Image: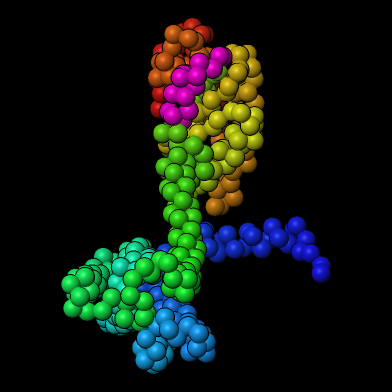
């Protein structure tokens, strides 16, 4: 038999992951689509029941362990519920998007499913492993898929019914597990044990698969939220919050000789005023791409706010930081930005550099880089200045 190639396996895995996790199947479904899933699971439950009923009826050696009349009744009831649940799938599919149907049909669909499960729980014993497992799984799946009002409107009556049956069974007013003809010591009866496993394993398997899908989607959402909180949406660079966290981490780990480079686009307000904010945004995106191309993988680049960017150059001396900043300045100046009318848009930036010291906190280092940036602005813009250089010009910044 020919094996699937590793490339094809990777493609299939990627597509499955994208469908189940990134597209958030199930979580983003409409309520009627979720009802279809619930009804399908209900049909699976009753098909499982019918399989057990038929197996018992065709194997007389097991008749001694069951109430045969109730098994015949189970065949009729399971078949009836199966037909009803299948019939309810059609309106759930047909009337998706209809507000009135979406408001009331879920109560009918989920209610029918719950009634059928409550009846099955009674005949096998309301505190049997099957009943308790189904009850817990039903609550968990319901709370994940549907809104609370729908879940609790089904959960409360079902709990009262099962609790009442349990009380009446213990007070010997109702037979416990009327389907089985086993008086006591159920766990010592092999047929009863295998019957419980027969019903429990599919329920647990389906719920585990469903919860694994939902948990993967939640993790994916958390990762997206984390990225959104750390990334500037326009430039896809780290935002101010992420940069501050990076600086705090560098300060905590005592990384030696890192440089902070603050840069500010010159006369950026004029670009917005003369050529439109869309050209201003386009300029920011192009500058962010240029900065990312000029840095090492270990370096960090972020948008610090407005037209201001920041570079964190790890294990970098002052001379090396000047070289990097000058390279970035030159690359920004060479950008060929054009207006909507085809007019060239000049883009330049001013840079301020500060070098870390053991006694300096991140905010103090930022302040030094900011002062150096003001020096570059006051000195005529489109230049690189380091904090160590003396301030000789009156600092006036537009």
The residue that appears at 37% across and 79% down in the rendered structure is 180
Q: Quadrant of the C terminus?
A: top left
The residue that appears at 44% across and 29% down in the rendered structure is 245
Q: Position of residue 209 (x, y in %)?
A: 50, 63
Q: Is residue 51 left or right of residue 33?
A: right
The quadrant holding residue 172 is: bottom left
Q: Quadrant of the N terminus?
A: bottom right
Whether 248 is among the magenta residues is yes
Q: Position of residue 196 (x, y in %)?
A: 43, 71
Q: Nearer the viewer, residue 246 or 344?
A: 246
Number of disc labels: 0
Give the answer, above or below, for where 275 lies relative to 147. Answer: above
Q: Is residue 72 left or right of residue 237?
A: left
The residue that appears at 43% across and 78% down in the rendered structure is 45
User: Does residue 292 show up?
Assistant: yes
**Residue range highlighted in magenta:** 243-257
Q: Nearer the viewer, residue 126 or 320?
A: 126
Whether 188 is among the magenta residues is no
The residue that appears at 49% across and 6% down in the rendered structure is 390
The residue at the far right in this view is: 2
Q: Nearer the viewer, residue 73 or 116?
A: 73
Q: Position of residue 347 (x, y in %)?
A: 56, 35
Q: Position of residue 322 (x, y in %)?
A: 61, 18
């Amino acid at each position: 038999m020919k094996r699937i190639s590793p490339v094809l396996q990777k493609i299939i895995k990627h597509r499955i992951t994208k469908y189940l996790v990134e597209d958030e199947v199930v979580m983003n479904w409409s309520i009627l689509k979720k009802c279809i899933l619930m009804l399908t699971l209900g049909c699976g439950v009753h098909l499982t029941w019918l399989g057990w009923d038929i197996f018992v009826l065709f194997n007389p050696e097991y008749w001694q362990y069951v109430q045969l009349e109730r098994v015949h009744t189970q065949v009729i009831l399971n078949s009836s519920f199966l037909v009803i649940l299948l019939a309810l799938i059609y309106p759930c599919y047909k009337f998706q998007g209809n507000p009135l149907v979406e408001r009331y049909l879920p109560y009918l669909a989920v209610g029918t499913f719950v009634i059928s499960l409550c009846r099955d729980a009674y005949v096998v014993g309301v505190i049997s492993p099957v009943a308790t497992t189904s009850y817990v799984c039903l609550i968990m799946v319901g709370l994940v898929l549907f809104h609370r009002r729908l879940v609790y409107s089904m959960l409360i009556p079902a709990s009262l019914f099962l609790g009442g049956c349990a009380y009446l069974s213990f007070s010997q007013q109702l037979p416990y597990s009327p389907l089985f003809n086993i008086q006591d010591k159920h766990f010592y009866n092999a047929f009863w044990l295998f019957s419980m496993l027969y019903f429990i394993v599919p329920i647990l398997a389906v719920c585990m698969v469903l919860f694994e899908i939902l948990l993967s989607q939640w993790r994916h959402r958390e990762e997206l939220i984390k990225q959104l909180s750390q990334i500037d949406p326009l430039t896809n660079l780290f935002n101010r919050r992420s940069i501050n966290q990076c600086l705090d981490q560098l300060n905590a780990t005592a990384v030696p000789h890192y440089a902070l480079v603050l840069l500010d686009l010159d006369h950026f307000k004029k670009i917005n005023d003369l050529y439109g904010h869309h050209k201003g945004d386009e300029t920011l995106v192009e500058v962010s791409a240029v900065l990312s191309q000029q840095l090492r993988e270990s370096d960090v680049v972020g948008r610090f706010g407005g037209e201001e960017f920041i570079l964190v150059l790890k294990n970098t001396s002052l001379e090396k930081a000047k070289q990097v900043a000058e390279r970035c300045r030159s690359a920004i100046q060479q950008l060929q930005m054009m207006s909507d009318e085809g007019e060239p848009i000049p883009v330049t930036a001013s840079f301020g550099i500060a070098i870390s010291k053991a006694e300096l906190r991140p905010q103090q280092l930022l302040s030094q880089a900011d002062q150096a940036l003001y020096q570059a602005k006051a000195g005529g813009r489109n230049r690189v200045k380091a904090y160590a250089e003396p301030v000789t010009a009156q600092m006036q910044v537009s």
